Amino acid sequence: MKVIKSIITMPLVVVICTSLSQCGREEVVEEQIAFAPCTDNELVPLESFENVSGTVITYKRKGFGANRDTIVYYVDAPSVLKTSTTPIGPCNLPTEVMKEGLKIKFSGYLLTPADPRLMLNVEALPFEITKLSLKTKD
């Protein structure tokens, strides 16, 4: 009798397990975000990237005198920065994703000034986003 009972309950356990979020596996859902193109005509595309995962980070830029401290938002994306620890600075990062630690997925172009001498001292590498989505867990 116990054998028959265990045979009957086993498929039930499997069905319940697969219907309840894949038995503990979290599914990543991407929410598309709207954004505007960059407007700086002094920058030209250098290299393109597709479907890069990154994390939004904040940087406090110190002000002097009448200039107050400001918070600047960058993206830490190791696959773009292969040999650099400098974060990327999207020129068109929407305000709704300017949140420390937010996980995003994006495509776009690493930018460079038409005059490379202007790139000597940067706190973030210029980047234009062409596709952007939030990475959320379902």
Image (tube, rainbow, N blue to C red):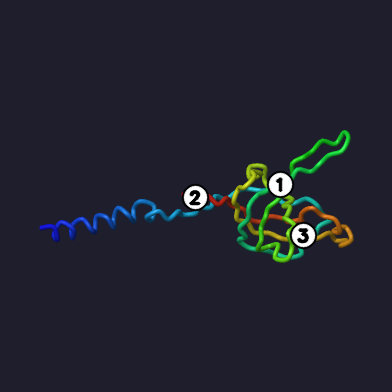
- Name the residue rendered at 53%, 52% in the picture: 30
Instruction: Work out whether mark 1 precedes mark 3 in sequence or the reverse, and give the earlier one.
Output: 1
Depth-wise, is mark 1 or mark 3 nearer the camera?
1
Residue type marked 1 = Tyr
Residue 81 in picture, x, y percent from top left = 71, 62
Instruction: Work out whether mark 2 precedes mark 3 in sequence or the reverse, and give the earlier one.
Output: 3
- Name the residue rendered at 63%, 63% in the picture: 50
Residue at the disc numbered 2: 137
Q: Where, by quadrant of the figure, is residue 122 drawn?
A: bottom right
Residue 79 in picture, x, y percent from top left = 65, 63
Instruction: Work out whether mark 1 precedes mark 2 in sequence or the reverse, and give the earlier one.
Output: 1
Residue type marked 3 = Leu
Residue at the disc numbered 1: 73
Towards the viewer: 134 or 14: 14
Q: How many marks?
A: 3
Q: Residues within 10 Å of mark 1 (few under 14, many from 20)?
A: many
- SS assignment at label 1: strand
Q: Is residue 27 left or right of residue 53?
A: left
- SS assignment at label 3: strand
- Report, in whole angstroms, how far the alpha carbon at label 1 lies from the one at label 2: 23 Å
Q: How crowded is mark 3: few (under 14 residues within 10 Å), some or many (20 or more)?
A: many
Residue type marked 2 = Lys
Residue at the disc numbered 3: 111
Q: Assign the N terminus to one quadrant of the image.
A: bottom left
- Name the residue rendered at 66%, 58% in the picture: 77
- Name the residue rendered at 77%, 59% in the picture: 111
Q: Is disc 1 in contact with disc 2, using a CB cutoff of under 8 Å?
A: no
- Report, in whole angstroms, how far the alpha carbon at label 2 lies from the one at label 3: 31 Å
- Report, in whole angstroms, how far the alpha carbon at label 1 lies from the one at label 3: 17 Å
Q: Is disc 1 in contact with disc 3, using a CB cutoff of under 8 Å?
A: no
Q: In the image as oriented, which residue stretches furthest toward the front?
A: 2
